[in-house]
Image (cartoon, coloured by chain):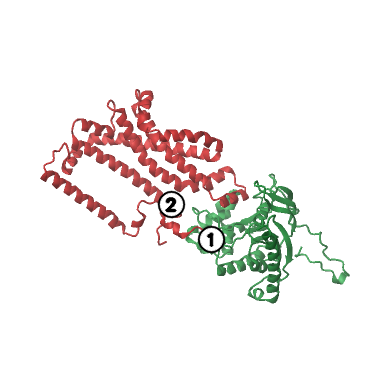
């Protein structure tokens, strides 16, 4: 029998805060954030810090408002690359994980190269990919780089999940003459779901990082994503605009993270230890 | 064959139903099982299991009783010998047609599926549609007293309730034989007694044949009409004890003189079995 004590071991970010009401959990950090912004505003004005070193939040807000159309277009470019890379990494990682769980030989062949791709810093591969693909299709090169970064957590987590099926449940499926498709659909994949979702949470963030890093490396030219807005603003010493682009990047990263946390909660809340509240 | 006693008497010693005329449900012929490590888990075993018998395999840990059960279930292949089902038809793949139910030591439920879907699993794997299976699933749930928990998830249930779900899942295919591998070993004694009584009711209601692995003398005597005592290394049957008391059995039997006498005999045999094993230490 699985021990009840495992309940407190959780994949949630802050398991100890579960007993605090949701409203308080949202209000307190928000209030803190607003207070810090206010302090920032006051200090910058009182100490007369030059705006190209640290602009006050009000100026950043103004930059965001003034440049909103162009920043939004850049946000859309980065978002599109991130989502495409994430979807490709998800589909590819899942497929390769299923194949590796099925065939030991396939796994033996695949994993060394997957690891090499993972441990080689993407910044170092980027120039090569940009030369091969990026001269004609820059976005395609960015997509490839972001996919490479996002791919490995899906593959390794899902493979682990597919292979960690309870041996007695395996025996049960054998007893009732399950076909290999039935085994995959009814046993292996549901068992791998919590692992896959944990991998997706990592990959979602990595896809964005990959998209941004790739665009940095790509440098000027047809760069139109948010990363390029950051570089461009820095070159022009337009620091408020740089902060505005950074704020949008943060917001994008946060949105991806919370979307995936929500998905995880939705799919696991009924049965998985990580998503159960303690009092149930 | 404890179930079919020679009833001579009036016909001057001629058995009305001579032994051998009724084919056993399972015939285990010269079966051995050697693990890849070279350990002989089950020494040459011959055993006939009759329809309607409740057999306990009683023995110390590591005596091969679970292995024997898995051999019968087809979850492992014997190293030599055969396991035949003389009265059964076989399907195209050589699997015997009388359906098996298997209950593991752990409830072995799918945590992501409701109680209903866990019990539906064996039928689903046989490609029976959900609508067509509903009545049978409800009946199996009712037989273990869990009608109200169809939509619960396993983690919402107590250990005893999970084990009931596991038994309902084994019964939903209406098997001819139920194989149970120390199913109640992890439960507290009160829950265990209750489940023992429920199991005997199901045994009679479903007209089951049961092979029940246990290391509890009391449980084996209470439940079975035949206790097979096994010794370890190599695992083999050293005693075949009939328990003649009729079913249904209840607390009257648990407190009766024949019950304690049979427990004493079975304990003595178990000691002999463990003595055999201890010589190696």
Up the image or down, A35 lies above or below A95; here it is below
Q: Give percent across and percent down for residue B171.
A: 61, 58
What shade has chain B been given?
A: green
> What is the CA distance from the residue labelled 1 to the residue labelled 2?
20 Å
State the image coordinates of residue B16 (x, y, percent, origin top left): 84, 66
Label 1: which secondary element: helix
Relative image position of residue B257 (x, y in whole percent) = 69, 76
Q: Which residue is mark 2?
A: A268
Q: What is the chain identity of the residue bearing mark 1?
A: B
Q: Nearer the viewer, residue B9 or A33?
A: A33
Query: Is A150 located above or below residue B5 in the figure?
Result: above
The secondary element bearing badge 2 is classed as helix
Q: Residue at x 32, y 33 (%)?
A: A213
Left or right for A27, reference B129: left
User: Which mark identifies residue B162?
Assistant: 1
The color chain A is rendered in: red
Residue B60: in sight, yes or no? Answer: yes
Using the image, name the chain to which the residue with label 2 belongs.
Answer: A
């Amino acid at each position: 029998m699985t021990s009840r004590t495992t309940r407190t071991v959780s994949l949630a970010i802050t398991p100890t805060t579960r007993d605090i009401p949701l409203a308080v959990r949202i209000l307190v950090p928000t209030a803190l954030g607003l207070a810090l912004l206010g302090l920032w505003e006051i200090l910058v004005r009182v100490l007369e810090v030059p705006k190209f070193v640290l602009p006050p939040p009000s100026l950043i807000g103004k930059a965001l408002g003034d440049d909103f159309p162009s920043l939004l277009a850049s946000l859309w470019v980065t978002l599109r690359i991130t989502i495409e890379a994430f979807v490709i990494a998800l589909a590819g990682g899942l497929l390769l994980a299923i194949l590796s769980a099925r065939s030991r030989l396939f796994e033996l062949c695949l994993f060394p190269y997957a690891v090499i791709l993972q441990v080689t810093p993407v910044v170092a591969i980027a120039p090569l990919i940009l030369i091969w693909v990026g001269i004609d299709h820059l976005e395609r090169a960015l997509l490839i780089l972001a996919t490479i970064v996002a791919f490995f957590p899906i593959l390794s987590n899902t493979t682990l999940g597919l292979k960690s099926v309870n041996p007695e449940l395996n025996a049960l499926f054998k007893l009732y003459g399950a076909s290999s498709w039935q085994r995959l659909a009814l046993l292996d994949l549901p068992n791998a779901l919590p692992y896959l979702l944990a991998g997706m949470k990592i990959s979602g963030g990595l896809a964005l990082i990959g998209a941004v890093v790739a665009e940095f490396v790509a440098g000027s030219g047809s760069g139109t994503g948010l990363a390029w807005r950051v570089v461009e603003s820095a070159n022009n010493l337009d620091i408020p605009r740089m902060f505005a682009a950074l704020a949008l990047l943060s917001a994008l990263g946060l949105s991806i993270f919370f979307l995936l946390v929500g998905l995880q909660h939705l799919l696991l809340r009924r049965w998985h230890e990580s998503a159960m509240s303690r009092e149930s | 064959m404890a179930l079919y006693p020679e009833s001579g008497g009036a016909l001057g010693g001629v058995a009305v139903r001579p032994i051998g005329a009724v084919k056993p449900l399972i015939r285990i012929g010269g079966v051995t099982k050697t693990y890849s490590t070279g350990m002989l888990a089950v020494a040459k075993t011959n055993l006939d299991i009759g329809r309607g018998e409740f057999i306990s395999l009683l023995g110390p840990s590591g005596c091969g009783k679970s292995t024997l059960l898995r051999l019968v279930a087809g979850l492992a292949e014997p190293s030599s010998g055969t396991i035949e089902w003389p009265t059964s038809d076989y399907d195209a793949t050589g699997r015997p047609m009388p359906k098996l139910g298997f209950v593991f030591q752990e409830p072995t439920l799918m945590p992501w599926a409701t109680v209903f879907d866990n019990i539906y699993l064996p039928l689903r794997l046989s490609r029976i549609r959900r609508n067509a299976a509903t009545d049978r699933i409800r009946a199996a749930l009712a037989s273990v007293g869990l009608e109200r928990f169809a939509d619960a998830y396993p983690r919402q249930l107590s250990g005893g309730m999970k084990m009931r779900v596991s038994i309902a899942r084994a019964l939903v295919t209406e098997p001819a034989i139920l194989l149970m591998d120390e199913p109640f070993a992890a439960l507290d004694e009160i829950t265990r007694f209750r489940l023992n009584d429920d199991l005997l009711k199901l045994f009679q209601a479903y007209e089951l044949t049961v092979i029940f692995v246990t290391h509890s003398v009391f449980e084996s005597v209470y439940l079975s009409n035949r206790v097979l005592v096994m010794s370890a290394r190599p695992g083999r049957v050293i005693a075949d004890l009939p328990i003649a008391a009729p079913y249904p059995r209840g607390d009257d039997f648990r407190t009766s003189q024949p019950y304690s006498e049979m427990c004493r005999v079975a304990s003595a045999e178990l000691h002999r079995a463990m003595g055999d094993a201890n010589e190696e230490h």
